[in-house]
Image: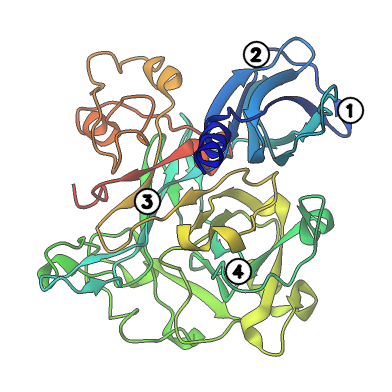
């Protein structure tokens, strides 16, 4: 008996087998020889980072397990900022003594930066004065991340499928690529919103517009923990479309001009446009054709179900200016990435809702500090994130700096995981 106990003790103390795992950057099926690219390898218990050598390869030494490898870098080409991103799963197994683990290809996809970006998404709601969840106060902020005015009059707002990541994915995924990515489009759910004809939407450099998703009213009048959306620049309010649920769409405040009510065509189900609390994937679009004609053409839709809950608009990938992917941590085992790599190459996790938190974009420290006139106006030691270990790595307090007269350039790598952090208090709440 004592001998058996001793054997068990020795077995438990045995160090895990460590495997050398080479990861090779690739593009279009060929090795991508770029030195100095940061590559991260993560699992439930590990978060490692290393940079590639001259051949575009990096080697991690890790125990057996399932990992995710990601890489992101920027490069200016002909005056256009290009983002390069890649993600792949790595299943590390022990191949036996004397065996060498084969190189894992990490395919890199190129995409352009956009002047218009999603600066902030507030979709988790807050707790009312009695501690009850209140979630009819959602908003999104669109930001001009450049030094040139942008005409956003044709910009649209959409939501990628599916809206519940526990639902069954109706699209085939082959070697990590979902079928509509190969076809050059991405499914949009329920409706696409646009600005009214004749309304000029000009966004000045380093400026923003606030779009109220639900209730362009002062929610703080009833729920002090909420936000005041009576001063929203635009709002989703088109009762004639079929999106007319009273809780979602109370009459906007008189401070919001009726010309600033955004319009839509309902092609999904229900009486409210779905902007999920945990599983949102918002997209900013810039169509190259009339959006009303687009949604009126049945050829532009793909119905994967027996009803309109799976009736998706086939939005060309080229229309997508910016997008982000949010999902719920309890759904991790059922999760799949909805956005193609060329649009977005990462995700964030909505671990808590109903707390007044928001997803806020990180600051591009080097680009912001390089702006003439920002010296002395930038506020550092940012402490506004929900978690200190998942904060804005720039250390710049963007909202405080803007209040001091600074101009902010936000991170735009087309990788939600690298571009956003969970802000403790939504910026409109201050």
Left or right of residue 121: residue 74: right
Of tags 1 and 3, the one toward the viewer is 1
Label 3 neighbourhood size at 10 Å, few (<14), some (14-19), many (20+)? some
Left or right of residue 418: residue 84: right
The span from disc 4 to disc 2 (Cα, nearest Å) is 36 Å
Callouts 2 and 1 close, C-beta under 8 Å = no
Q: Is residue 45 above or below residue 263?
A: above
The span from disc 2 to disc 3 (Cα, nearest Å) is 37 Å
Residue 332 x %, y %: 54, 58
Q: Earlier in the sequence, mark 4 or mark 2?
A: 2
Tell me the residue that label 4 is attached to. Answer: 162
Q: Residue at x 23, y 27 (%)?
A: 405
Left or right of residue 143: residue 399: left
The span from disc 4 to disc 1 (Cα, nearest Å) is 32 Å
- The residue sitting at the front extreme is 1
The span from disc 2 to disc 1 (Cα, nearest Å) is 18 Å
Residue 5: numbered disc:
none
Label 4 neighbourhood size at 10 Å, few (<14), some (14-19), many (20+)? many
Residue 209: numbered disc:
3
- The residue sitting at the top extreme is 54
Q: Earlier in the sequence, mark 4 or mark 3?
A: 4
Residue 205 x %, y %: 42, 34
Tell me the residue that label 2 is attached to. Answer: 36
**Which quadrant would residue 365 be assigned to in this image?**
top left
Nearest to the observer: residue 353 or residue 226: 353
Q: Residue at x 35, y 33 (%)?
A: 389
Say which element carries label 4: loop
Tell me the residue that label 1 is attached to. Answer: 30
Q: Earlier in the sequence, mark 2 or mark 3?
A: 2
The span from disc 4 to disc 3 (Cα, nearest Å) is 26 Å
Work out whether residue 82 can be spotted.
no
């Amino acid at each position: 008996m004592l001998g058996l106990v001793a054997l068990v003790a020795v077995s438990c103390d045995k160090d895990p087998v460590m495997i050398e795992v080479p990861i090779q950057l690739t593009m279009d099926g060929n090795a991508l020889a770029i030195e100095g690219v940061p590559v991260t390898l993560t699992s439930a218990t590990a978060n490692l980072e290393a940079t590639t050598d001259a051949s575009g390869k990096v080697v991690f030494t890790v125990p057996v397990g399932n990992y995710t490898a990601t890489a992101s870098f920027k490069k200016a080409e002909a005056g256009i900022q290009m983002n390069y991103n890649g993600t792949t799963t790595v299943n590390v197994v022990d191949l036996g003594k004397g065996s060498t683990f084969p190189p894992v290809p990490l395919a890199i996809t190129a995409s352009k930066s956009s002047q218009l970006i999603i600066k902030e998404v507030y979709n988790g709601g807050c707790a009312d004065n009695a501690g009850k969840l209140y979630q009819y106060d959602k908003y999104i902020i669109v930001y001009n991340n450049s030094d040139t005015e942008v005409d956003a009059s044709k910009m649209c707002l959409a939501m990628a499928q599916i809206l519940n990541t526990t639902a069954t994915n109706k699209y085939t995924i082959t070697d990590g690529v979902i079928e509509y990515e190969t076809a050059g489009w991405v499914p949009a759910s329920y409706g696409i919103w646009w600005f009214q004809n004749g309304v000029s939407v000009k966004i000045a450099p380093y400026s923003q517009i606030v779009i109220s998703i639900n209730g362009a009213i002062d929610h703080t009048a009833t729920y002090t923990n909420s936000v005041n959306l009576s001063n929203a620049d635009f709002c989703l309010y088109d009762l004639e479309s079929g999106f007319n649920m009273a809780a979602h769409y109370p009459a906007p405040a008189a401070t919001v001009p009726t010309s600033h009510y955004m319009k839509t065509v309902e092609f999904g189900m229900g009486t409210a446009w779905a902007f999920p609390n945990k599983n949102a994937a918002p997209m900013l679009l810039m169509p190259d054709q009339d959006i009303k004609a687009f949604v009126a053409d049945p050829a532009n839709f793909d119905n994967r179900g027996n009803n309109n809950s799976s009736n998706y608009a086939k939005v060309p990938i080229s229309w997508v200016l910016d997008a982000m992917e949010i999902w719920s941590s309890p759904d991790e085992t059922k999760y799949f990435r909805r956005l193609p790599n060329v649009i977005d190459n990462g995700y964030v996790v909505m671990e808590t809702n109903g707390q007044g938190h928001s997803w806020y974009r990180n600051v591009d420290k080097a680009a912001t500090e390089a702006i003439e006139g920002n010296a002395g106006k930038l506020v550092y030691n940012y402490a506004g994130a929900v978690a200190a270990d998942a904060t804005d790595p720039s250390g710049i307090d963007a909202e405080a700096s803007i209040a001091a007269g600074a101009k902010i350039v936000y991170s735009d790598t087309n990788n939600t995981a690298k571009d956003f952090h969970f802000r403790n208090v939504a910026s409109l709440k201050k």
